[in-house]
Image (cartoon, rainbow, N blue to C red):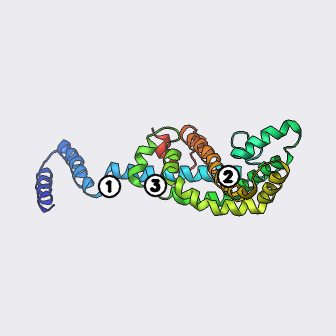
Amino acid sequence: MRRSVIAIAFVAAAVLGATGASAQTERRGILSEIFGGLTRPSAAATSQRDAASALREALTNGVVAATTRLGRVDGFYRDGRVRIPLPGTLASAQRSLRPLGMAEPLDDLELRINRAAEAAMPQARTLIVDAVRGITFSDALSIVRGGDDAGTRYLRQRTETRLTELLRPHMQSALERSGAFTALDTAVSRSRLNAGAAVGRLRSDMIDFAVTKALDGAFAYVADEEKAIRTDPAKRTSDVLRRVFGGG
């Protein structure tokens, strides 16, 4: 480092010794390049920082928009794209009993599962936004240069297992509050399901299924929001979003 500084000093001295108007103009340009390079951050470092900031902001905006949309009454239940069906055996029984006019308890259970997912969205928002903050500088640049949903795919791949663990107790509470477990007991007793001691297992499966489907719905709409920010200038509501996604 010391040798570099000494060498720069010799170059600067030589430049300062030049005479004439054109030489002075050239001198200012050379000195600017020499000393400016010593103080300003590299372009690569700046672009990494901008990429990380923009990506975090874009995904946070997407998560907030998606979970707000899905967290309303009927956010899941009336949306054919993300509506949560009954899992496995329960879905089969529902299909079999509907033509007989006997599927009402299972239909009620399906409604309550969707209500539970809607109620769990505020917690899902907090958990996913926390995960967004963990995106690293080194990953951000390649994600920004990726496809329309590259950030969402990265986020899901890196965080889904942990998010599932964290969201599960909140979903269980939401299912209890919605009356879904009571509805499950009623459905089993009235719908000729030979469940017996397996009701406890059905409850556990229902929690896992509801968590997975709730995250499916949330990430589907986060991906939509990410794509919109990448493609629609009106969605870029900050300087860093416009610099990274608007500048090409």
Residue at left 83%, top 50%? 108
Q: Quadrant of the N terminus?
A: bottom left
Q: Are marks 2 and 1 in contact (CB under 8 Å)?
A: no
Q: Are marks 1 and 3 in contact (CB under 8 Å)?
A: no
Q: Residues within 10 Å of mark 2 (few under 14, many from 20)?
A: many
Residue located beneath label 2 in the image: 210
Q: Nearer the viewer, residue 242 or 227?
A: 227
Residue located beneath label 3 in the image: 135
Q: Nearer the viewer, residue 9 or 102?
A: 102
Residue 84 in view, yes or no: no
Residue located beneath label 1 in the image: 41
Which element carries disc 2, helix, strand or loop?
helix
Q: Earlier in the sequence, mark 3 or mark 2?
A: 3
Going by the numbered disc 1, the residue's amino acid type is Pro
Q: Is residue 122 left or right of residue 140?
A: right
Q: Position of residue 224 (x, y in %)?
A: 60, 41
Q: Determine the CA span between mark 1 and mark 3.
A: 21 Å
Q: Position of residue 87 (x, y in %)?
A: 69, 46
Q: Determine the CA span between mark 2 and mark 1.
A: 48 Å
Going by the numbered disc 3, the residue's amino acid type is Ile
Q: Nearer the viewer, mark 3 or mark 2?
A: 2
Residue 68 in view, yes or no: yes
Q: Position of residue 143 (x, y in %)?
A: 45, 45
Q: Nearer the viewer, mark 1 or mark 3?
A: 3
Going by the numbered disc 2, the residue's amino acid type is Ala
Q: Nearer the viewer, residue 70 or 35?
A: 70
Q: Nearer the viewer, residue 60 or 183?
A: 183
Q: Nearer the viewer, mark 2 or mark 1?
A: 2
